Image: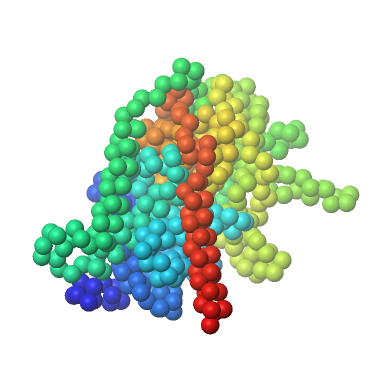
């Protein structure tokens, strides 16, 4: 074993934890926009170390790396409970270990199968990786936030591949490159002749993967240069209001002051004569639609409605909805996280109730068995919302759009459903103010860029504290507001630039191919085991 191999085999695998954290830009600063390059090498120390190791050593190394890496990269989530003594630790105690388990499974299963079929290592690792990524998006505890592909959101030419493969395809390529590079480094023997390098099979594989990335990037540049123009396209001028209302302040005691701030910012935006106004999630913690239906509007509603009538522009805002369920002779009311569209004449046109609620933040699974923990989470500011049932397109000025509330924007399936239903653009309203970090804001924001590319339509993003922006169908940011800045933006959506993408039509084919590939390997391994067992 040469010196480099010996060095790589030492316990420097925890460097991966730091590199993963650095892969995701945290500040809107030009130098840090180059940090996504680190993602292409972030897993190399860990992959080098676990190659050929026992299952026990692999599990331990990947668990320690995953624990540290997720704590660095996603420790900001603990801020949800930071206002209550011990709350930060409680939140992380629930979340970080669960994320670590997924990471550990990715590495452990990949290494186990790779030792069975070492010639397929650079395909096995990314295949297993995206299968488990997909599993993370399923069920009521779904949290598909930690995709390594999101680190590339500023690498616009390369991420055009998401229009074909989706985010899972981007994950696949990054993991494959890390695996190929790790194998080449391990095999490096201090070659003195070019022939030695050219005859090294690991160098050949690494070169092939590198060339594939170059081809993907060049194809992305070509795609960006093509100007799509649908003669049936329409334009819509949108105003997005970023109000920076503190999520920790008491709403009820300041409701009219907050409304006045929202109205003032909106008045300024009206100078640009927008067709449609968008406020963020939690812009109002009011029962606007419920009171409109029941005829019980209060002075808050009247001020808002009078303002809308005054300017005659439709307005979308976050609100608290109520759903009614009958229990015998009693009517029980349950809160929902809503988006409500109010017409220019002041009428409530449509409401949407968030379907994908944040586990332990907006609803609490197993609450009957975990009552003390549920009470603690609610003391942080958590809610007990009831999920909506059906996604529904909203209409404004002859265009249709799909509502995404908060982290619904990280669910690829939800967005594809809207696109297939005929959405002309997405609107993602969110409130990331509670994160208290740049990390949380930008990690969430990166997913919005991918949803636009995957589906080939515009994304309007309204964040209470940011990142508010308008993103075109190819992932280019047309207009944006820095985070934590009380301001507004206006921009025009031109649906003639929309394009039907391969991904929006056919979905995650790369995932299905990976599943088939891994299934064949597992069946082959079982077949070999049975043949050896019964041959003896």
| Quadrant of the rendered image containing residue 124 | bottom left
Residue sitting farthest toward the top: 231
Image coordinates of residue 71 in percent, x first then y, are: 42, 66
Image coordinates of residue 205 in percent, x first then y, are: 29, 57
Image coordinates of residue 466 in percent, x first then y, are: 43, 43
Foreground of the two, 319 or 105: 105
The correct choice, above or below, for 47 with respect to 311 in the image is below
| Quadrant of the rendered image containing residue 215 | top left
- At x 42%, y 28%, the residue is 490
Foreground of the two, 376 or 17: 17
Asked if residue 354 can be seen in this view, the reply is yes
The correct choice, above or below, for 515 with respect to 238 in the image is below
- At x 20%, y 60%, the residue is 199
The correct choice, above or below, for 327 with respect to 419 in the image is below
Image coordinates of residue 392 in percent, x first then y, are: 63, 35
Foreground of the two, 506 or 11: 506
Asked if residue 237 can be seen in this view, the reply is no
- At x 53%, y 74%, the residue is 531
Quarter occupied by the N terminus: bottom left
């Amino acid at each position: 074993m040469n010196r480099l191999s010996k060095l790589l085999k030492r316990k420097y695998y925890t460097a991966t934890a730091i590199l993963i954290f650095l892969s995701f830009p945290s500040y809107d600063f030009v130098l840090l926009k180059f940090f996504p390059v680190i993602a292409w090498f972030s897993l190399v120390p860990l992959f080098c170390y676990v190659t050929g190791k026992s299952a026990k050593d692999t599990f331990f190394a990947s668990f320690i790396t995953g624990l540290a890496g997720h704590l660095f990269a996603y420790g900001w989530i603990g801020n949800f409970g930071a206002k209550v003594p011990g709350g930060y630790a409680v939140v992380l105690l629930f979340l970080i270990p669960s994320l670590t388990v997924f990471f550990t499974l990715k590495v452990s299963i990949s290494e186990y199968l790779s030792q069975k079929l070492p010639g397929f290592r650079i395909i096995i690792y990314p295949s297993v990786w995206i299968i488990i990524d997909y599993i993370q998006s399923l069920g009521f505890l779904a949290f598909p936030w930690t995709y390594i592909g999101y680190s590339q959101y500023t690498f616009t030419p390369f991420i055009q591949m998401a229009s074909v493969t989706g985010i899972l395809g981007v994950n696949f390529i990054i993991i494959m490159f890390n695996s190929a590079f790790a194998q080449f480094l391990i095999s490096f023997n201090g070659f003195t002749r070019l022939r030695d390098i050219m005859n090294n099979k690991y160098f050949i594989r690494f070169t092939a993967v590198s060339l594939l990335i170059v081809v993907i990037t060049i194809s992305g540049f070509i795609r960006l240069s093509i100007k799509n123009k649908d003669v049936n396209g329409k334009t819509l001028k949108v105003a997005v209001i970023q109000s920076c209302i503190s999520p920790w302040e008491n709403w009820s005691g300041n409701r009219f002051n907050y409304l006045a701030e929202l109205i003032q910012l909106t008045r300024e935006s009206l100078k640009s004569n927008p067709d449609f106004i968008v406020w963020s999630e939690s812009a109002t913690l009011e029962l606007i639609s419920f009171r409109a239906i029941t005829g019980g509007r209060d002075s808050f509603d009247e001020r808002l409605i009078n303002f809308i009538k005054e300017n005659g522009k439709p307005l979308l805002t976050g609100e608290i909805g109520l759903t009614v369920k009958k229990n015998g002779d009693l009517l029980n009311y349950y809160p929902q996280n809503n988006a409500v569209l109010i017409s220019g004449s002041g009428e409530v046109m449509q409401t949407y109730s968030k379907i994908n609620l944040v586990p332990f933040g907006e609803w609490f699974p197993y609450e009957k068995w975990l009552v003390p923990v549920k009470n603690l989470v609610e003391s942080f500011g958590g809610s007990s919302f009831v999920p909506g049932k059906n996604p529904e397109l909203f209409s404004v000025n002859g265009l249709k759009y799909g509502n995404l509330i908060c982290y619904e924007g990280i669910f690829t399936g939800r967005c594809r459903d809207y696109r297939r239903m005929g959405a002309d653009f997405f609107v993602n309203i969110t409130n990331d103010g509670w994160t208290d970090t740049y990390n949380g804001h930008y990690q969430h924001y990166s997913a919005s860029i991918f949803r636009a590319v995957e589906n080939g339509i515009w994304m309007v993003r309204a964040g209470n504290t940011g990142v508010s922006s308008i993103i075109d169908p190819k992932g280019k940011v047309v207009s944006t507001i820095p985070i934590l800045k009380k301001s507004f933006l206006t921009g025009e959506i031109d649906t003639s630039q929309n394009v039907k993408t391969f991904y929006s039509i056919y979905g995650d084919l790369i995932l299905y191919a990976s599943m088939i590939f891994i299934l064949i390997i597992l069946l082959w391994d079982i077949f070999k085991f049975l043949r050896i067992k019964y041959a003896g």
